[in-house]
Structures are given as C-alpha cells and as structure tokens.
Image (cartoon, grey):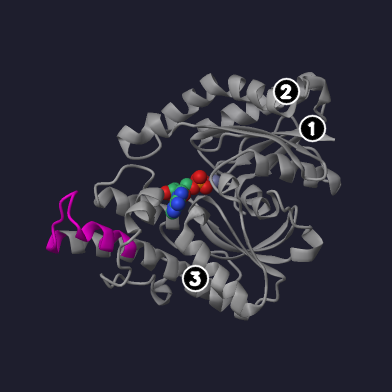
Amino acid sequence: MNVLGIETSCDETAVALAREDGVLLANAVRSQIARHGAYGGVVPEIAARAHVETLPDVLRHALGEAGLQWSDIDAVAATRGPGLATSLTVGFQAAKALALRLGKPLLGVHHLEAHLFSILLGPDRFAPERVLPALVLLVSGGHTALVLFEGAGRHRLIAQTVDDAAGEALDKGAKLLGLPYPGGPEIERLARGGNPGAVPFPRGDVHNARRDIRVSHPEYCYSFSGLKTALLYYLKANPITPDDPRLSDLAASYQQAVVDTLAIQVERALRETSVRSLGCAGGVARNAALRGALSAIATKRGIPFLAAAPEVCTDNAAMVAALGAALLASGAEPTPFDADILPHWPL
Ligand code: KG4
Ligand code: ZN
C-alpha cells in the first residue's frame, strides 16, 4: 500500500510517499523562507498563496521521485491541524480532491502527532514495539511539549509551554540580536566557539508558571517569556553592534539557557515515567547542543535516544504519510469528506 502525504500547516509546502510498512519512497519539501524573511516571520496570506502556487509542482516532483503513477496511490493523508487556517486549507482541500478523484480514503492527521511519529523514521527505522512508549520532547517554532508517545493515535500530553515555544524564544532572541529569520539555526551558527557561561540567563522558572492548563503534569511545564525579556534588558544595558566579538558568547549563553530549560524538565519527567526511550522531534530538534544534552540524559537512564533525522525535524510530509500509513494499518476510520480543518486542534 502506498500513502500520499501532504503538509501545508505553515510555510513549507511538502509532499511525501510512504509504504504501509513505513518505508519512505519520496520526501519533497519546498521552503518559503525567502518570501517571509523580509518580514521577520511567517505572513499567513503570503504562505497560503505560495502553497497554491507550489503544491502541484511538489506533488509531481514527489511522484516522480517515488517512480509511481496516480493509480498506485492507495490513500491520501494530509495535515488537518493545528496550524495557519489559510495554509492548512490549501493542502487539506487538495488532499480531498485527490482522494475523491482517485476513489481512495482520506486521512486528516494531527501535525504534532506526525512530528511524534518522525522519531520512528529515517534510514535505521526503529521497530515501534522495541522503543515505545517513548517520552518525546516536541520542540518547534509554535509548540513545546512533553508527550508520552505509545503509537499511532495513542499519546498523552504530559506538559507544555505556558507562554512562548522554544523555537519562538530562539526566533525572537535572534531578532533582538539583529539576526535573520528563522533564528534557531542563526543562533546555533553564531554560538559555535562562544562561551555558553558568559551571560547568566534565567532557566525558565516553572514555579511561576500557570497551573491551569490541561496537561497531566503541570509541574514539568515550560516558560520561555522571561528569557526573551532578560535578553532585551541585557541588550539595553550592554548595546552590541553586529560585528561585536561578544555576540558569539551572547548567542551561546542564550542557546544554553534554552537547552538547559528544556533538559531540566525532561530529566525530571523521566524519573517518574516508565518509558523504553527518549525522543526529540520538531524544528528545534535539529540543534546539536540540545541533541547532545538529551542524548546524555538518555545514556544516564540507560535508554536509547531517538532524535528525529534532521530532514524530518522541520516541517515535512514524510511524517504525515508515515503516520497516515500506520493509522490505516491500525484500522483507523478514514476522515469524512465534509471534515473541516482544525487550526487549534489540541493534542
Ligand atoms: O517544526 P518547524 O519547522 O515548524 C513549526 O512547526 O514551528 O520548526 C521551526 C523552528 C523555528 O523556530 C527555527 O528557528 C527552529 O525550528 N530551528 C532551530 C534549528 N533549526 C530550526 N532551532 C535551533 N537550532 C536549529 N539548528
Ligand atoms: Zn511543525
């Protein structure tokens, strides 16, 4: 069985093909970063219109890469939410049209659940029964959460950020430092060679965090808004120019504060959760300092560390197609054709 996956929840136009057993046949992604860069963030209308323009070509490209014909497609999976409403609409409507025309089932999938699934992808794919349940740190530009991941369609939200996401903290911090969008990779590049102990930024103080959000363990929740404010005040007191040699120390210290904040809660949660592995997924999972910190924690616990492969950390359709295939294999019901997108779909 071949499953076509479509992802357009934000600013990547992505199409992939996965076999029922999870093997990827194609993984095509077209980034829109160049179109949004000048605005310092994603502009929803520009994103949606770029998806309209680009999606047909990315679809053709993915089919070609897989060496498949339309008639070889057995199901169509697409991100139904959460995400930007106008962006989601383009991919989800295209998926409906394709599924209707091909007479195949439609699967509307949850974007974050697809990110969870990305820890199982890649060249040395892990057998789910060997590594699940996993404690997964989901870190992207829009989300930061700790999730108990048990399999396709089975997961529990343990904790999440009460304010900014980790990627958002990096993006906003980068903007304050005069770096382009997206800020995460820029900060990582600048942090190389810098001293992570140079500036004592706060590690997200969860004691001040709101306790009223719907998670199973509010005590493991994250907070990043104080960090961004600390950088703002630091820069007011210590103005810095773009070629200032201290910039590298500053980036390294800021990155370390984000990594430590994430790692502290993971370590705490692991002490009280019985899992077979520790996973990390989402755009920020590309960060080498974060991967290193989490890998050390997993080693200390004697469990494997499953970091999503770099090419499936940022938004992609491989995770959507593979989750769609796993859902079908597990007997999940197809999504009805009158289903709407769910921009605020909770995990
Ligand atoms: O998962 P993603 O592509 O999109 C969302 O669903 O949000 O994640 C994008 C986020 C951005 O905040 C970006 O700055 C961050 O991932 N990111 C990184 C790195 N690469 C991307 N953060 C830290 N280090 C990186 N190497
Ligand atoms: Zn994402």
Residue lying furthest front in this view? Answer: 193
At label 3, the amino acid type is Ala
Task: Classify 60 as above or below 22.
Answer: above
Which element type, helix, strand or loop, lies under badge 1?
A: strand
Instruction: Locate residue 169 relative to residue 330 in the image: left or right.
Output: left
Name the residue nearer the viewer: 297 or 73. 297
Q: Mark 3 to mark 2: distance in Å?
A: 42 Å
Instruction: Locate residue 91 relative to residue 235 in the image: left or right.
Output: right
Which element type, helix, strand or loop, lies under badge 2?
A: helix
Residue drawn at (63%, 78%) of the image: 301
Q: Mark 1 to mark 2: distance in Å?
A: 9 Å
Residue drawn at (31%, 51%) of the image: 174
Task: Classify 32 as above or below 273.
Answer: above
Residue 66's spot in the image, x, y percent?
73, 29
Q: Which residues are magenta?
A: 236-252
Q: Which residue is mark 2?
A: 98
Looking at the rendered image, the quarter that the C terminus falls into is bottom right
> Residue 147's quadrant in the figure?
bottom right
Task: Classify 271 as above or below 135.
Answer: below
Instruction: Locate residue 133 relative to residue 228 in the image: left or right.
Output: right
Looking at the rendered image, the quarter that the N terminus falls into is top right
Q: Mark 3 to mark 1: distance in Å?
A: 38 Å
Residue 29 visible here: yes
Name the residue nearer the viewer: 242 or 50. 242
Task: Determine contact: label 3, label 1, CB under 8 Å.
Answer: no
> Residue 137's quadrant in the figure?
bottom right
Q: Which residue is mark 1?
A: 75
Circle on res. 263: 3
Name the residue nearer the viewer: 87 or 65. 65
Please rate how many residues cluster around mark 1, counting C-alpha atoms within 10 Å: few if below 14, some from 14 to 19, many from 20. Answer: many
At label 1, the amino acid type is Ala
